[in-house]
Image: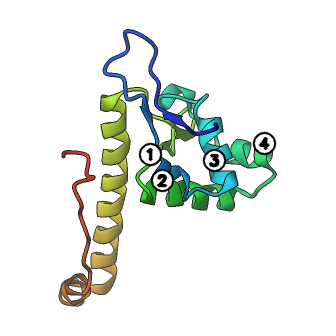
Amino acid sequence: MLGSRVGASPAGEGENVECEIPISIRNKLTTRQLWVLGILEAHVGEAGAIGVQEIAAILGATGRAIQHDVQAMRILGVVIGSISSGRNPGYYLPKNAEDAKAAVNRLVTRAVHQLETVKRMVGGAQFAGIMGQISLQLDGGGADQ
């Protein structure tokens, strides 16, 4: 089935992250998300990243739809890396544990920068009020756990 394995690494390239996506997660994916995951299985590691527009063209979808699919899969716990600059921007599956951690850390850095931007836009006191209304449920799925 498409999307059944994540991050198979070639021998000798570090700790293998190859794993089965639990059926409980697979059952929550749409058909297109399963196809996206299947495409990503051929694009392992940063060097193998595939652009969002290329995925969209393969599946007959919009780039925005693919971005939403990737976000939905990430919310379910599927680690999908992304690169927004350099020679080969796009999405990829991590090839090993180190690669997966780097992908997660890249998302954390992006989130922190977004919060810093909001703080500068609204000012410190108003930001504290906004942050007082935000609650994150951390269930042990973080990069350092």
**How far separated are the C-alphas under marks 4 and 2?**
24 Å
Q: Quadrant of residue 67?
A: bottom right
First of labels 4, 1 by sequence position = 1
Circle 3 packing at 10 Å, graded few (<14), some (14-19), many (20+), is many
First of labels 3, 1 by sequence position = 1
Tag nearer the camera, 2 or 3: 2
Tag nearer the camera, 3 or 1: 1
Q: Horizontal and vertical percent for residue 9? A: 44, 20
Tell me the residue that label 4 is attached to.
Answer: 58
Circle 4 packing at 10 Å, graded few (<14), some (14-19), many (20+), is few
Q: Horizontal and vertical percent for residue 78? A: 45, 48
**Is 90 left or right of 17, judged from the image as shown?**
right
Find residue 86 and name its label: none
Total marks in image? 4
Specify the amino acid type for callout 1: Pro
**How far separated are the C-alphas under marks 3 and 4?**
13 Å
**Is 1 left or right of 126, judged from the image as shown?**
right
Q: Height in image: 23 above or below 119?
A: above
The reply to whether the C-beta atoms of the residues labelled 1 and 2 are less than 8 Å apart is yes
Q: Secondary structure at mark 4?
A: helix
Find residue 22 and name its label: 1
Tell me the residue that label 3 is attached to.
Answer: 34
**For the N terminus, which image quadrant?**
top right
Tell me the residue that label 2 is attached to.
Answer: 25
Q: In front here: 1 or 101?
A: 1
Specify the amino acid type for callout 4: Ile
**How far separated are the C-alphas under marks 2 and 3?**
11 Å
